Image (cartoon, rainbow, N blue to C red):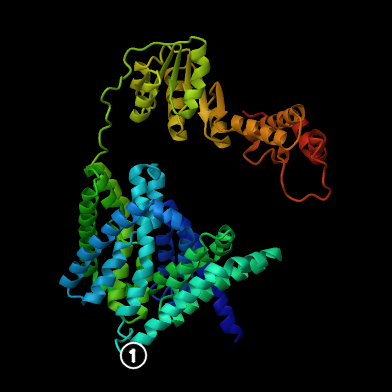
Amino acid sequence: MAEQSGFDLVQAVAVLGAGVVGAPLFKRMGFGSVLGYLAAGLVLGPFGVRMVTEPEAILHFAELGVVMFLFIIGLEMRPARLWSLRREIFGLGAAQVLACGALLTGIGVLAGLSAPVAFIAAMGFVLSSTAAIMQILDETGETSTPAGQRAVSILLLEDLAIVPLLACVALLAPAGPSTGASGWMTLAIAVGCVAAVVAVGRWLLNPLFALLAAARAREIMTAAALTVVLGTALLMQVSGLSMAMGAFLAGVLLSGSSFRHQLEADIEPFRGLLLGLFFMAVGMSLDVGVVISQWMLVAAAVVAFMVVKAIGICAVALLFGADKHEAINRAALFAQGGEFAFVLFAAAAGAGLFDPMTHAIMSSTVILSMVLTPLTVLAARRLVPAKAVDTHGLEVPDGLTGSVLLVGFGRFGQVASQGLLARGLEVTIIDRDPEMIRNATKFGFRVYYGDGTNLDVLHAAGAHTARLIAVCVNDRHAANHIVAVVKSTFPHAGLMVRAYDRQHAAELVHAQVDFQQRETSESAFVFGQAALEYLGLSQEEAGETIADIRRRDAERFALELASGPYAGMGLLHFNAPKAEPVPFVKPLKAAKALNLEAERIAAAPAPDAS
């Protein structure tokens, strides 16, 4: 018994360690953490080093991660949010899922699969990887664009689709409900269980969590959250429906609760750990021997499914008014299968719909399509370059001169320009957002269209004659590029730069700009002083407190430049409980009493930053 326990502990350490190494490594390489977990499971499984020889046991337990994942999705599905995105989600999203599902089901039937198997295989591939797509959108800065929001809406519909699809697996399974009296009884039990969950969620859960919150015991709230998720999932399973459907329903019912954020925080660590374990178990279950022996079939499935799905996505996108560029880019993004395919395929295998060969081939098809996603996106953007910016009616800089060149005329640049213009200085303004330029023109500004990262544009805008170049763009990478160009080509000009945060400000100081300003710091100081005055301090007392905060911030920044980002931590005020409460009415004295060590550090000579 001791030997078996020791072996089990070795397995647990190996599985956790492989996940810790594999997920960050693959994410750093641009393939996403899901593929990292799959690869780690493949290495540890029966077709790798055989550290784990029975992945089915781990898979059965790790399915709780999927249950908790769907509970979290349910918590985010507030009725108001769904209603605001109804056209994109239930119009565009549903059209893409249904069209691609029909096309891929046809491919499966033509390949010789039965209709139920072809349908589940197709719908699993239709559900694209939310993790992979969101990562690409974030990296390219497209998440907040209209095209990005449409992509997010489609992903949202796909996340919702997993719930009815899991129910379809139960209905299509060989041992599914019959059509006689027992079938009606099963249906009645399922409806009754759903009604019970709705009633409990609407009238009992909020009072229950309020009572538990009054006990002020965090572990009780966590236990209650797990009980709600797992209990609802168990009830749905007993009723003949899926555990995932029960968890999702519980999440939706609690989405409007005042305890929603607390529940999400309590469940999130378990969800992340168990979902990662689930993907590792899928990797362990992958039959490499089948894939190798059927490599031609797997390769053909990858190509056929990705091409047909991409065609369907393009057709739907064009039908809903997208231009050619957006349609092709969306097709490249969504052409792969995703993590929910493994959930659906595992359910189909457990229900007897998929035999081991079909399960292995379809799982391999999804995995290879996910690996190819970054390459397909890159190829699409190379083959179909971004559509030309509509610059009709916009002026471009050419042979300009002026005392000040202001690059970037967003909210920050607009306010920064006012002092310069008030003193009658000759200010040349350039920006690369055509819509913003047109709006600024309506208010009487003259803004030229041009990219400040381009050396020729800077020359044409008069950087060679400017006394000052003010960089007010909201992209830190673009700002750093402009700084490098200006320092090397226009060293005579003063250089003032908008900083994104403290780290960016430090980068700018090391780049030897003449002045940098964090974009939110001054407004935050003003806000903090107004808050103190609202709470009863006099204007003088509040001003003294904020002046002390400014001094501490400057000292801390100097220490950070010399010794790294964690230097000067003692100069911050923290909200952790203190042994002896300090009266609030004397903020300066309290600050000195609480930060004697910080004052000593600040008084000492700072190390040489060079």
What residue do we see at 34% from left, 55% from top?
89
Within 10 angstroms of label 1, few (less than 14), some, or many (20 or more) residues?
A: few
Is 85 or 168 nearer to us in this picture?
85
What residue do we see at 47% from left, 58% from top?
76
Q: What is the quadrant of residue 556 in the picture?
A: top right
Query: x%, y% of residue 363?
Result: 32, 69
Does the image show residue 286? no
Query: x%, y% of residue 196?
Result: 49, 76
Q: Quadrant of the N terminus?
A: bottom right
What residue do we see at 63% from left, 34% from top?
527
Amino acid type assigned to the residue bearing label 1 in the image: Ala
Query: x%, y% of residue 280?
Result: 44, 68
The residue identified by callout 1 is 181
Q: Which residue lies furthest to the top in this view?
A: 424
Does the image show residue 415? yes
> Could you say whether the residue bearing mark 1 is in a helix, strand or loop?
helix
Q: Is residue 321 above or below residue 259?
A: above
What residue do we see at 71% from left, 35% from top?
532
Q: Is residue 446 above or below residue 143?
A: above
